[in-house]
Amino acid sequence: MKPQNLVDMLHRTVRRFPNKNALLWKEDGHYRGWSYTRLWETIRHMAFGLRSLGVQSGSKVAICSTNGPYWLVSDFAIMSLGAVSVPIYPTLTGKQIRFILENADVEAVIMETSEMVDRVPEWPKRVRSIIVIKDRSTHPLATTISSVLKRGESESVNVDRWGWQQLKREDLATIVHTSGTTGDPKGVMLSHGNLLTNIEENLSFVPVSSRDISLSFLPLSHIFERTCGQFIPMAVGGTIAYAESMETIPQNLVEVKPTVLISVPRLFEKMHQRILDRVENSSFLRRRIFGWALNVSKERWNLTNGELGWPVPVSLERKYLLARKLVFSKIHAQTGGRLRMLVSGGAALDPNVARFFALIGLPIIEGYGMTECSPVIACNPFVHPKPGTVGKPLPHSEVRLADDGELLVKSPSVMMGYYNQPEETAKTVENGWLHTGDIAEFDEDGYIRIVDRKKNILVLSTGKNVAPQPVENALCSSRYIQQAVLVGHKRKYVAALIVPDFEVIRPLANKWGVHTDEEIAKAPGTRELIEREMERLTADFAPFERPKKFALLSRPFTLEAGELTPTLKVRTKQVEQRYASVIAGLYEDIPAEEVAASTADNGGHTEQASSLTDRFSKVWSTDDRQTDTWSQAASPVVTTPSSHLPTNGASMDMRKKAMQNSNWVSVMADTVTLLRQLFSPPVLIGILIGIVAGFVVKWLWF
């Protein structure tokens, strides 16, 4: 018999694995953990503590915190009382937090720090209790989580059944607010059954078991991380390890040695780019060996197509095992050495990145979903993934395309509706079919490819329709481009706003005599570099899809500036409003190089604020070139950047000549490096020993 609610699901796991580690987190420099038994006891204490504060069936309780053990404890404790948990992104402003508290009729709030409490200028009158996890707050409604747990421990005694067993699948479990790309966030009501169905169906595509350890760092307020990174491990008896922060992910990977990693595409793209950068700066011999290893793996992949059980020639399998041992194992070691599966969601993943990780033995399973569907709608099977698609629909989920190509879904995972918004619910779910708002296609095997958001389609004045997302994704695959937004609705051609990756370009820019981000954005060398990248990356698109002009911005889009949602999606309307004058310049008869955005166009924001994307970039683009590992290798085809471009005053011809000289210098350097390696003392000694050994063998044989 299936679990009747999420707490029942966890309770069954506790009985199966009472002494197994459920949670791990860093404290005083070391990872410590709770067994499933200890976790269940803490949830019980928290539930009785909340009950003593007036939380009861139907109460709405918000959780505003970064990932950690008390996030999960609070979530299950709230639901065990028949109450409803309301996750809130800890990065939101006080005004945004207050909107969600009022919209969801929240009565109690669990916050991580007193700073978050102070961030809210005026608390709604409905809120009666504020529980702070890490420190104390002077707010009159505030109390500490330790005092709540102590109160709950004294009242619960050893009671193991306090009402959660009465909850049914159709009962409301949580209200999750959408990212609000086109307006105010809407509260999505998800039942226990919605989430349980999604959990059960995901497990048929992604084989997670009690032996798996996952590293959790995506915000648990995002339903993708909450379902796949919290509920699924708790359903199968896995272990969740919490990263300390975004900056410590590489260190935590080595410490925890996870087997499963869930993330958004940006992290995998940065990991991929880091490997490419390192091979580009490695020796000629290392590049050739890595290229050989990739070719061997590609040959094997073409035979098996990623499936298990296919016959592989013994000679090829030996080469592949050698490639794994000599090359790929060094990359695996950087992620802890035990990763067997990467899961990507939240945005489109570059197919080239997916193929690369598959070749080095770290397959990425890409899925697709939305909050309104708990969230997963489709997923690539582990044994037969197709890069460039989001996989097949989950079992018991029906999908079809509307006349305009919009993807429609009918599934037990589809939401109960938007909280207190019946009209919006009726617009989104018609006759049981969820309108996703995404334009999609099916291939011959039934795999789904997402084209773009329906509202994002650019209709040019020429009558052509352009889906910006594929072009934007292609542009962002460049190591030199951090963000890209296409514009051109109701105009005669497509243009682009480009945010360069300043950290990658900075070493080149310093040689041009420019240093600040604004100077880099305005430098002719940067424009030429980005222009070459755009021509290369958009070559396969139709002419009307390629940007005819572009502007370089001097700062990234950020959450704090209102240009990104909490899930890091670009709010296109806000971007177009903020850079209206820049966009207008792209459609005037002025030279393209004169169209650039400075800090004066930032709408009052002179410095970029830290965002999740920026932190990903900093974490995975660190220059570790002194580390002598095979993770310094990359693809067999390496393009040398224009690292010797002349300064701003140089003409175009001079820059091209300098680039040609730079390429010749690179080739000569590689040749010198190879000769040094061939005639180094160890090699010469090895040759001498081989000659002597040959004479000895010949003498003994004859």
Image: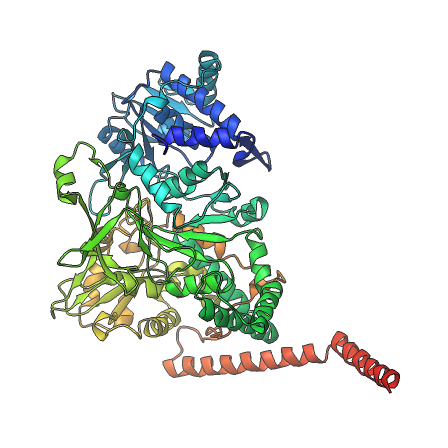
Number of marks in the image? 0
**Image location (x, y in percent) of residue 88:** 33, 35
Residue 44 versus residue 336: which sits nearer the camera? Answer: 44
The N terminus - image quarter: top left
Q: How is the image coloured?
A: rainbow
Asked if one can make out residue 75 in the rendered structure from this viewpoint, the answer is no
Vertical arrangement, residue 626 with respect to residue 163, above or below: below
**Image location (x, y in percent) of residue 525:** 39, 72
The quadrant where residue 120 appears:
top left
Vertical arrangement, residue 595 with respect to residue 340, above or below: below
The answer to whether residue 214 is left or right of residue 610 is right
Q: Residue at x 44, y 83 (%)?
A: 657
Asked if one can make out residue 443 in the rendered structure from this viewpoint, the answer is yes
Q: Residue at x 61, y 81 (%)?
A: 671
Q: Residue furthest front?
A: 1
The answer to whether residue 404 is left or right of residue 496 is left
**Image location (x, y in percent) of residue 651:** 38, 80
**Image location (x, y in percent) of residue 389:** 33, 60
The quadrant where residue 629 appears:
bottom right
Q: Residue at x 31, y 44 (%)?
A: 375
Residue 430 versus residue 103: which sits nearer the camera? Answer: 430
The quadrant where residue 162 appears:
top left
The C terminus - image quarter: bottom right
Q: Residue at x 31, y 55 (%)?
A: 392
Vertical arrangement, residue 123 with respect to residue 437, above or below: above
